[in-house]
Amino acid sequence: MFRDRIDAAHMLAALLKKRKLHDPLVLAIPRGGVVTGAVLADELGAELDIVLSRKLRAPDQPEFAIGAISEDGHVFLNPHVATPYEVTKELLEQERRYQLAEITRRKKLFRSARPQASIEGRSVIVTDDGIATGSTMMAALQIINTQKPRDVVVAAPVAPPDRLAELRPWCDDIVCLHTPEVFWAIGEFYDDFRQVEDDEVIALLRPFAKPTARRATPATRSERKA
């Protein structure tokens, strides 16, 4: 059990400090993930930015994700959770439009505080305050991998092991503190899992608005694997 997001992030940072990172960039999934990401960036001497992906909600159960949509509009449906729900094409399209509009709103709001960071050739740490279905993280990884990172590490305080297994092909490594077999919701592993508001995200991003000088860019992950 973690006290709060900051407590969990400090534990994650202790593990990540053991890694060799090149020009590290922490990409956090708003909103709660930005609290985690700010601690990681501070502890690792890294740059902090956001990656915008949103879960697609199940009908009549908005806290449950049937999939996710990335900033570029790509839809990822989670095969493990979509089947029990009656998700028609019309409902899916309605939810897709709604979440894409929310991504656009957040992009305009958060980018006013922190211009988008360059990903190419850098060690990228993708973080959230936890992973449940894995859909939102999967959508984030798909868009990040198109931008030629040097390597990608998924970092989360808690996640079910089967979801982590599904994410592994999309990243170079995963750092996770707690991988319970029985998993209902991320909040059950925190004493304090309060809602994070937009204003707090903006305040956390502003100190990273002026990135430090970049170092020489090595081969990207795809080039090294070629």
Image: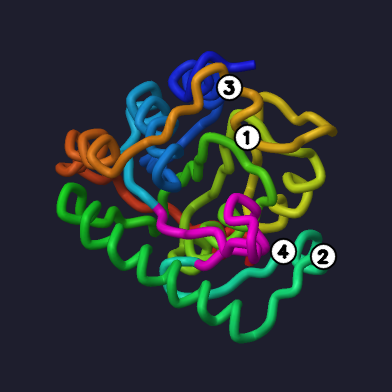
Instruction: Tell me what residue is drawn at x 57 percent, y 73 percent.
Output: 75
Query: Which circle marks residue 190 in the picture?
Result: 3
Q: Are marks 1 and 3 in contact (CB under 8 Å)?
A: yes
Furthest residue in direction bottom, as rendered: 90
Instruction: Tell me what residue is drawn at x 47 percent, y 24 percent.
Output: 5
Query: Which circle marks residue 84 in the picture?
Result: 2
**Lower position in the chain sequence, tag 3 or tag 2:** 2
Q: Please provide percent x and percent y for residue 94.
A: 51, 79
**Mark 3 secondary-structure assignment:** loop
Residue behind mark 4? 78
Residue behind mark 1? 186
Q: Nearer the viewer, residue 123 or 68?
A: 68
Q: Please provide percent x and percent y for residue 111.
A: 22, 56
Q: CA distance from mark 1 to mark 3?
A: 8 Å
Give the magenta part as a residue range. Answer: 51-69
Q: Please provide percent x and percent y for residue 225.
A: 64, 61
Number of other residues with Cα within 10 Å of mark 3, as a class: few under 14, some 14 to 19, many 20 or more: some
How many marks on residues? 4
Magenta span includes 153: no
Q: Amino acid at mark 2?
A: Pro
